[in-house]
Image (cartoon, coloured by chain):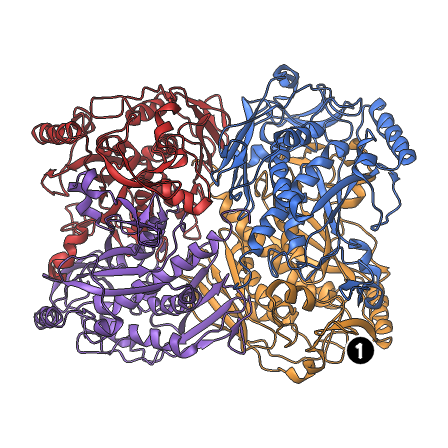
Chain colours: A blue, B orange, C purple, D red
Amino acid sequence: MNTTGRLFRLTTFGESHGEAVGGVIDGCPAGLSIDMEAVEHDVQRRRPGQSTYTSPRNEKDSVRFLSGLFQGVTTGAPIAFIIENRDVHSEDYDHLSRVFRPGHADYTYFCKYGFRDPRGGGRSSARETAVRVVGGAVAKQLLAPLGIDCRAYTSQIGCVQLPKDLSARYSREMVEASPVRCPDPSISAQMEAEIAAAQSACDSVGGIINCHIGGVPAGWGEPIYDKLHAALGAAMLSINAAKGVEIGEGFALASMRGSEANDQMTTDDADNITFCSNHAGGISGGISTGQDIHLRIAFKPTPTIGQEQQTINENGEVVLLAAKGRHDPCVVPRAVPVVEAMAWLTLADAFLASRTDRIE
Amino acid sequence: MNTTGRLFRLTTFGESHGEAVGGVIDGCPAGLSIDMEAVEHDVQRRRPGQSTYTSPRNEKDSVRFLSGLFQGVTTGAPIAFIIENRDVHSEDYDHLSRVFRPGHADYTYFCKYGFRDPRGGGRSSARETAVRVVGGAVAKQLLAPLGIDCRAYTSQIGCVQLPKDLSARYSREMVEASPVRCPDPSISAQMEAEIAAAQSACDSVGGIINCHIGGVPAGWGEPIYDKLHAALGAAMLSINAAKGVEIGEGFALASMRGSEANDQMTTDDADNITFCSNHAGGISGGISTGQDIHLRIAFKPTPTIGQEQQTINENGEVVLLAAKGRHDPCVVPRAVPVVEAMAWLTLADAFLASRTDRIE
Amino acid sequence: MNTTGRLFRLTTFGESHGEAVGGVIDGCPAGLSIDMEAVEHDVQRRRPGQSTYTSPRNEKDSVRFLSGLFQGVTTGAPIAFIIENRDVHSEDYDHLSRVFRPGHADYTYFCKYGFRDPRGGGRSSARETAVRVVGGAVAKQLLAPLGIDCRAYTSQIGCVQLPKDLSARYSREMVEASPVRCPDPSISAQMEAEIAAAQSACDSVGGIINCHIGGVPAGWGEPIYDKLHAALGAAMLSINAAKGVEIGEGFALASMRGSEANDQMTTDDADNITFCSNHAGGISGGISTGQDIHLRIAFKPTPTIGQEQQTINENGEVVLLAAKGRHDPCVVPRAVPVVEAMAWLTLADAFLASRTDRIE
Amino acid sequence: MNTTGRLFRLTTFGESHGEAVGGVIDGCPAGLSIDMEAVEHDVQRRRPGQSTYTSPRNEKDSVRFLSGLFQGVTTGAPIAFIIENRDVHSEDYDHLSRVFRPGHADYTYFCKYGFRDPRGGGRSSARETAVRVVGGAVAKQLLAPLGIDCRAYTSQIGCVQLPKDLSARYSREMVEASPVRCPDPSISAQMEAEIAAAQSACDSVGGIINCHIGGVPAGWGEPIYDKLHAALGAAMLSINAAKGVEIGEGFALASMRGSEANDQMTTDDADNITFCSNHAGGISGGISTGQDIHLRIAFKPTPTIGQEQQTINENGEVVLLAAKGRHDPCVVPRAVPVVEAMAWLTLADAFLASRTDRIE
């Protein structure tokens, strides 16, 4: 299944070193004007080569839309697009083609399909996430007019972390001003040093991304299996290298008491219902409460590193491997727009589903 | 969507204080002998009234199968079953019917559906999970003959936790010997004290469940959106009160370096491919590696507590609420079989999907 | 897959001689008052034992709703219901249990599942359609307030047919006054004679059902694979014994010219857009035109007959079989409410989908 | 929904006068060698400009594969492909851009999406079927090694028809030798005359396509809603201009008796189970019997004709329209490979589903 979503669906295709990557968005309502520059801007946020901390692969990542738009407006037909693969150095991977890289999906793909596509990780490459960013950019343009906003940022790199404060509000400018997408300049600098240290050791480092979503009205999400946080959680865990997700206070709730964890309710001056706290992260019983939605996603370190590691070749022999080629020492900064994209896609799906909740 | 799974599908129905809860399993292959006593045993593990730490609601939870079996063997037809609701004390909920309980899904259901079913939380009650346990018990009987085993246990209650050791192996007997399903007798006793303290304070407490799955062959799971850990993660986050999930070392991977986090590969004496470690938790690139699969799921404290809390009634007025009725001070022990059920259901789906991976 | 529909979904279960048949309706919007007597009335229209021309099996077919309703109103939760099997004479089938009945699904089920459930055809029995009628009755109550009406009637039994006139309008009373559900009394009498003749020859006979749907607004249906007539067609072909379906003039369009077949457009006195004809049957390009929708469905004769026929037993030996037991000599009259039910279910799905067609 | 299939899925995109049409095949097992020349050959069979009876639009329709293949072998990743639109004469459609063509989907798309894409019918153009042919060509290569063969041919154009004989066997050479794809040379000549007569009258004509599928083993198809003939029927009704479908004797079964319609069973010299007839068309109870599968599909005449017809413009005014531009006077010959493609796609899906029917 290379499709995500039930009503707002994105199907992706393409390998990192094939002809192109691309996608098909199906189910986007008709009549939506698409700001192409905004799409392109989002794609550029994800692309490699933006700083010394990301892979030097230089790709323009220009998106070519093939269908579903007429004079810049969605028609209800499927919206297909491709991003050609231009800066392909497959020879970089020649030395990897007959070994399984530790921590990488080479071995499991081989076990599943009985087959090895050695070109740059093939389908498992993070390049596939460029397609998600395009899908997310369209979903964003569907939802932003409703007042919804989604912002992710780096909250931890290696051992350097922002104080965990779910109520903190960071502007997009603060995030984008940092080469590691951490909104606190001083901690950003420490994170940069953490990455540089790993890089100089021919090593890599993991991290955590926080995602805050504002403006979602109360009542979105499905109560049992497609709980809004389960859908968001699955979307986040589908990002390369993601190994954990929590909603609201998440794992910290395990050591709380109910009297502390419950978000008590009250009314504001205008007699609107409000909450006294937001430990639950904006979702209760799988359905949005109208508060901000908070997620945190843990990423493991990039598996492909320059240090020698023990692994197996296709003949089943133990060999030592020190990877060459262009690899990010830390995927986290570039994963920030991917986290946002997956959030937008999931919310667009929940939005369309909410239209069928009641008789009118 | 009250259906989980794509090939091995469970659809559930029923409210906690309606006539019955039940489910339909569709897609179970024909020819499988179902051990009814084993199903009943699993259901009994989840039911309330097992100890002083769980809700005193006393239900036999006897499962009545309606279809899909002939002489105890699956026929390929959908397997429907119901569990009648017998011990229903709806009057317990009368005092709740016009207020929104803090931390509970009352308010969000109301926002979504414009409607309030006050009877015991209706569909959002944990009683729905009894149905999942039946579905999981059937999935288990499909998979266990392949050598797959799935065991969950309580690893944290409030501030009491087992040492985090993914390699620890606990027998089912050790787990079931503990009233809180913690395999270490001394820590179990501390956890019991933690629950008792919360209970005596008219409060509740959260916790963490670990889930170890052994015997899954390499190659299960889908590489992009239905990654095996994304599917397992969504399944776990669909359990009432779950607020976080991690795979393998999970959030701890964020502060590791690649050289430390990568699971290097080697061969054993019989020249089989093995791994030198299992930080990834048995899944790489969304596909099983053949190692044990490790998950950890965080649960928030039960929201319904006896302490007074501030909330809103249906007229939008601020009121104080101290809940009466039968409520677990800690849902974690009873959630252990639900975690296992969701794992079995997800794995059964991945197993059937794996049959179409390659030409034969 | 025992589920039909994408947004308004019906999952069915149960075998004709098992404990019960039943279903789960998922996706019905909240806030719909269900008229239970109307549901029961629809179910009684389908049940056996209504006339000498239908199977004498006498079942009350009383529907028990288990969930999804509160004080008679849908809550948004899945609506489950069962119909217990009471008048089960499994011994009637003992003589069939080791042979494959010609024209019946016994043999193909055996080939598919490697398994034989001999009790009254098991899952392939028309009894499953009682469940569809319940689902259709709920869908009808969702759509009827929009002004949609769906009426089916028998237009052919054996060689006796109503003149093919798509514009004919028959009231429900005219249809229900006929024991074979043919609205023309004189032709109804001939049809009855046709069935009686077949019955006295220990034989059975086929027929055709017409289905007219009025009030569907222009714009429902999906343009490519889920064209409204493709969805209706699949729904009709999923009814037992259905072997053909046509929309509008259907097969007769093959010999028409475009100038004759096209439905030219004009305006009425109130300047509304109207059509000069309706050869297309109310659907163009897979999307409703706002005109009446016309379908015709062909049914083969009941396969189980009293005449001796050559067949095979489970040992692969050729044997002669003359079926005993209770079997309709013609399924068509009882299939009329099933045709309507499948139309209602398909339309409810298209209705909900139409809510996501455009930005608002 | 622009996706067909559950396990072997084809998603299509593109408008007839946009940048490109294309598709994504998801779920094709890994390890299948794709014969690209065979794919291209199938596509060329559908393309316009092949004879005086088809649209003179001249497109090379060259397929560019973007992903999912490594050294010509499927990898398990989604197989994406595009066909660029080169010979686009959008100006041909200028005179159509503000009127709704009678019999065409212009009006219904407008009602659904509130939007008009005037370029050559946009998404509703038959050009979309080129993509289905590519999908079908891949599905064929999956199934042909199992001994399955699928051949469609024209059995009726206007009032000229082949004798209805389901047992007739025509070679592909006989079909392809005819410019209208009718295997009988003398009747083919009459059909050509029928089309020529319509064309010289600035008119169009409809027809019927028969489809014979051999080699499908007994046991494919789902018993209730995804009956094999319901899935095939929906696939056929999803083809532009299709207005009816029948299986086996189809509508003729309505006037048969059971003793005549039932396919009695026997054994052949090698003691294999066989049938004495095939009135059911190779499917019983929704599941393949192992006999040949027979379908017939009715097509209405092309709606766009040169004769003047009354219609409505976007201001709601009645106008007369005589269409110009390149339009087939009869779509049937070009629809023959599309019928085959839809059959192959449906069968590939049933094949993969059959792998999960039983425990092994």
Q: Nearer the viewer, residue D109 or B280?
A: D109
Q: Residue B333: give x, y in percent of width and height.
A: 73, 66
Residue at image coords 51%, 72%: B82
Residue at image coords 56%, 54%: A353
Q: Residue A349: give x, y in percent of width and height.
A: 58, 48
User: Mark 1 Cα within 10 Å, few/some/many (few <14, many 20+)?
Assistant: some
Residue B289, can we see it?
no
Q: Residue B178: give x, y in percent of width and height.
A: 76, 68
Give the vertical position of D63 relative to D309 (above or below).
above
Give the vertical position of A312 relative to B186 (above or below).
above
Residue located farthest toward the front when viewing the structure as drawn? C269
Q: Amino acid at mark 1?
A: Ala
- Could you say which quadrant of the image residue C5 lies in? bottom left
- Could you say which quadrant of the image residue C345 lies in? bottom left
The chain letter for the residue carrying disc 1 is: B
Residue at image coords 82%, 64%: A269
Left or right, residue C205 beside residue C223:
left
> Which residue is identified by label 1?
B322
Q: Residue A166: give x, y in percent of width and height.
A: 82, 50
Q: Considering the numbered disc 1 on the image, is that residue within a helix, a strand or a loop?
A: loop
Residue B4, can we see it?
yes
Left or right, residue C18 beside residue B160:
left
Left or right, residue D333 beside residue D43:
left
- Total number of numbered discs in the rendering: 1
Residue at image coords 48%, 29%: D80
Give the vertical position of C297 relative to C128 (above or below).
above
- Could you say which quadrant of the image residue C135 lies in? bottom left
Which quarter of the rendered picture does the N terminus of chain D lie within? top left
